[in-house]
Image (spheres, rainbow, N blue to C red):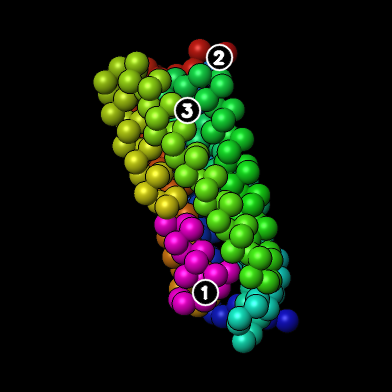
Amino acid sequence: MVEPSDAVQIWLWIGTIGMALGALAFLFMAARERPGHRWFQTITFFIVGIAAIAYLAMALKQGYFPILREGQDMAEPFYWARYVDWFFTTPLLLLDLALLAGATKEAIVWLLGLDVMMIATGFFAGVTASDVRYVWFIVSSLIFVWLLWVLLSEVVKAANQRAPEVKAKFIQLAVLLAIVWTIYPILWLLGTEGFNVIGITGEVATFTIIDLIAKVGFGFLLLSNRKVLEAARPTMA
């Protein structure tokens, strides 16, 4: 059985603690708001709360199994819990953005559907030991490009109809997410699931950092201006 190194475990605990602290902060922010006025706080709490659970599973050595991939000399841990995290949290991140922009229901369905397809094909890329994983990786990457097009074209159109401060916040967050999410496929190629250039420690450390930016950092940027949130608040009860 492949045992993660102490350095890997430290990074996983950093991720666990960082996500947990973010969840507590966002839960406090949600508690300050009236029912019907805390959509963004609630969604963002669940983003980091789910991520904290996934990181805890990996830190406790329950969220992985070893895989010996074609072209590699030794088995490396495959952190399937990471994909479970992304399967639930990335649609919620997109939902935050879509609600902020005032996107149509059709655009929201496109965003969430494409995201689920992207994560599912990414999982098959990660779990496949043979070089067929690169076929899955290409498919997942193409879906990612499609998702970005929907986000930065169709959803931006809706954001253009919002108040200037809401539009500015949406653009800030959408650009952040697009940049950070672009790092993920690059890291996949360089990490143990791809060409194994940086090794498992570098892979886990980088994933942890960009996960914290994409979730906790995104959350604080989104929730930092209550005036913007109130102006963008969904009309649902």
Q: Is residue 88 magenta?
A: no
Q: Is residue 159 visible?
A: yes
- Disc 1: CA contacts within 10 A as few (<14), some (14-19) or many (>=20): some
Q: Which residue is mark 1?
A: 195
Q: Is residue 188 magenta?
A: yes
Determine the secondary structure under disc 1. Answer: loop
Q: Which residue is mark 3?
A: 98
- Disc 3: CA contacts within 10 A as few (<14), some (14-19) or many (>=20): many
Name the residue nearer the viewer: 90 or 7: 90
Q: Determine the CA span between mark 2 and mark 1.
A: 47 Å
Task: Say left or right for 149 vs 35.
Answer: left
Q: Determine the CA span between mark 2 and mark 3.
A: 14 Å
The quarter in which the C terminus is drawn is top right
Q: Which residue is mark 2?
A: 236
Amino acid type of the residue tagged 1 in the rendering: Phe
Amino acid type of the residue tagged 3 in the rendering: Ala
* Residue 157 at x, y percent in the picture: 38, 22
Determine the secondary structure under disc 2. Answer: loop
**Residue depth check, mark 3 versus mark 1: number of the one nearer the observer:** 1
Residue occupying image coordinates x 59% and y 47%: 118
Task: Say left or right for 235 vs 58.
Answer: left
Per the rendered image, the range of residues in magenta is 183-198
